[in-house]
Image: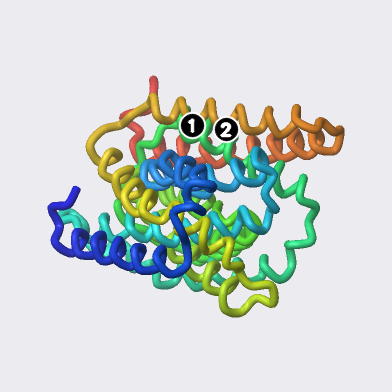
Amino acid sequence: MFKSKIFTAWYFSALCIWLVLFANFDSVAFFLKHWYYAAMMVGGAFVAGFTPEGGGAVAFPVLSVFLEVKREMARDFSMMIQSIGMTSASIFILTQKTTNPKDYKPLLVFVPVCALGTLLGFNVLQAIPVYIIQAMFLSLSVTFVIAYYFSDHRGTEETVNIKTKLDIVYLGIILIIGGMISSLFGTGGDVVLYLLLVTHFNMTAKKATRISIFLQASISILGYSYRAFYDKNPISHYQVQTWLCAFPVVLFMAPFGVYVLQKLHVNWMLRAIIVLNVFQILYFNFTHPARHKVIASVVCCAILSVIFYFMLQHMVKRNKALNPASAPA
């Protein structure tokens, strides 16, 4: 994993920066009291590099649902930790000999458009009741990972080929929606972009995953910066301390997830993620049970399942049209 001199330099430079920040803003006593931030990101950061989901896919529900941390703080932590983990994964990808930087040029447009959606979400969507936001996120996680596991990811394109004006419209809408989703959960924009890339643009799962990682890394940095330096209720010293607790974990585990992904296709890992996500949504509904939580979860799961089904059907039909010889007789 450390064959690239550039990645190795980034890794150890970031580690040194963490040591300086930890010495000035954190303490061993605080870390020992809040060890679970680092522990949960062992799996969370691996998921960020191994799948199109960011580390916030683990951090947000663990903090917001299981530990009952304020939704805003769970969202901020997701963005803060992804700004390190997914950036580390992105640098690892870019410094590999097989990577062609030109394949990722569309991100120069994707990131600003998605960032506009994030800013819009920060200023418009934050008044949505917490239980609806939690139900939306948990439903998105469980329906997406099930669709991801059972669908046939056999796209052939290695680049984003925009052929019509309608393609531009699709991308613009999805990126804005993805940014708005990220403003609620700290993650999610990567998932919706990934789905569009593998279904409408017929991209390979590997390349679509990498583009989604780059996007969420950028949006996490921008969202974190907005909250830290511009928002009227900026990030607190406590949040910085919890971020520093998990910093070195995600710095290594996110690129390690990418490393594993390029070596082998590990179905057992996806099965474990499915079990985790199903458990999360059941825990959400059976802990402090309430009719409105169940209704929100069922409605969100139903809507997202229908959306994912038709998007994946679109991918199958597109693949059959492009490769008629492979279609069953």
Colour logic: rainbow
Secondary element at image label 2: helix
Q: Whole-percent x and y of residue 25?
A: 47, 67
Q: Whole-percent x and y of residue 183?
A: 62, 61
Residue farthest to the top, as pictured? 329
Q: Whole-percent x and y of residue 132?
A: 76, 46
Callout 1 amino acid? Ile
The residue where tag 2 is placed is: 277
Q: Nearer the viewer, residue 122 or 150?
A: 122
How many tags in the picture?
Answer: 2
Quadrant assignment, res 325: top left
The residue where tag 1 is placed is: 273
Q: Whole-percent x and y of residue 162?
A: 41, 62
- Residue 69, above or below 72: above
Q: Do tag 2 and tag 1 residues touch (Cβ < 8 Å)?
A: yes
Callout 2: 10 Å neighbours few (<14), some, many (20+)? many
Q: Residue at x 49, y 41 (%)?
A: 40
Quadrant assignment, res 139: top right
